[in-house]
Amino acid sequence: MPYLARVLVVMQDPRVAQRIMDGLRARGLFLFSARNGAEALRLARQLLTDVVIIDDLLPDGDGCDFVDMLHNDPDTGHIPVLMLGGRASSALRRRSLAVGVDELLIGTYDEGLIAARMSKLVRLGIMQAELRRRAATARSFRVEIDRRRGQESRDGPPVLLLAAQLGEDLDDVADILQSRYRLLRTAGAAEAAQLLHEQVVDTLVLSFDGGDREDWLGLALHVRDTPALYDVPVLGIGQVASAPDVQTLIQTGIDDLISRPFSPDELHGRVLSALRRRRLRRSLTAMFASLEAPATIDAETGAFQQAFLRVHLSRLVFEASKWDKPLSIATVSYRNLSLLIERRGPAAAQSVMARAADTLKRLVRVEDLIARADDNTLVAVLTDTPGDRSLKALHRIAGSLATTDYGLAGLPTAPIWMQMGHASLEPSDTADSLLLRARQILL
């Protein structure tokens, strides 16, 4: 079966490593282990690792020393890391942030909590792996990635929104946060949602201790379902008894749950980790955009050219087949463009394709590739995506395309005939056969 991500587990105690792997295996992850830092560095280089889970203490050294070496190696520097610490320590939290640990989980090997923290790191790993592949393809078209575009510059401290239930007092949390951040406060989920749309917020912090927690779960879902807010980290604060279960937390897109009581260092560490992930996602997004150049992009649609699609899809198929990773594609064909050209001219057909490509780009993830396959067909290449998830995405895409304004209103024309297809990678597939099957298997 294809695996969503390849995860290296580095634990001093092999029994703990096995327990973690047993708990995560059913979540579509390929898991392998190492007992020390030296073996872990070798495996991380060899086995196309997407995420590393590591103990803070290893038989041959400190876990932070390993992370430092991992991130200073050009071949492994992109790999996200989840560190498990035996007990809380300000020194460990500061050191882990300094060497680039993405997530630090203290005092528990609970499979649900590890899975909750892992989900966003898997996404980061997938984004970085696809950026590496796409940059390699772009080089064959003499386009180089612009890493300067990934260097975010912004004046002033990050903006945090602290959202409480009506009548709830969060002054203790506010006192901690306002020493380092620009802090906004709201009362109630509706007011928080409105403020999120009115100004830039870097992290949303909400409390589960007062009122109806369903309001906050609904707010978190709203953030995840809104393209303009999708990358805003959502941190929950609350007593363990009042907090949602881990599965609910994952489903609603809450990034982290901070259980009371917590120290100022604990809260700052969690916020800083969330802010770092957001900066990284924005940096990766900017670097993806830098690969869109006249040599790679179709001028009429703004999607990648057919030649780029052919080269890159071959690369994706080879790597997915080698490492048993999922890959799906969707096709969108406008079958009566020739009639539209006859009645309205080439500009009308160009408008249809350009607006469809723009809609597709807004509906898929940054790491998914939108390309032009021929005069009337666009392709969405959904990297590291199993067939069931890609079908859900395809139904969402179909609904949006059906209501897209193609810029043809007010003038007589034939109805736009849209036909969608879908295929997921099979062991015998080549890039050509995968694309051919997608054109034949219609939604």
Image (tube, rainbow, N blue to C red):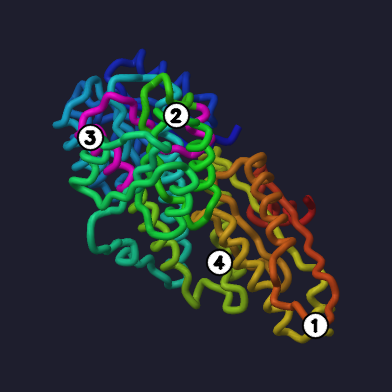
Please name the residue that numbered disc 2 is placed on.
115
Disc 1: which residue: 411
Point out residue 319 in the picture as x, y percentages from the top left corner: 52, 47
Specify whether 344 is left or right of 46.
right
Segment colored magenta:
247-276
Nearer-N-terminus badge (1/3): 3
- Choose between 102 and 386: the one closer to the eye: 102
Q: Amino acid at mark 2?
A: Ala
Please check the rendered image and state whether residue 405 is part of the magenta-colored stretch, yes or no.
Answer: no
Q: Is residue 43 above or below residue 403?
A: above
Dividing the picture into quadrants, the one containing residue 188 is top left
Contact (Cβ within 8 Å) of mark 1 with mark 4: no
Residue type at the position of mark 3: Phe
Q: Residue 125: horizontal and vertical position, in percent?
A: 42, 44
Q: Position of residue 95 (x, y in %)?
A: 17, 36
- The one nearer the camera, 156 or 330, is 156
Establish if 176 lies above or below 202. Answer: above
Q: Which residue is mark 3?
A: 66
Nearer to me, 332 or 13: 332
How far is the residue under mark 2 from the one under mark 1?
53 Å
Q: Secondary structure at mark 4?
A: helix
Q: CA distance from mark 4 to mark 2?
A: 36 Å
| Precedes in sequence: disc 2 or disc 3 | 3
Indicate which disc, 1 or 4, sits on the residue closer to the N terminus.
4
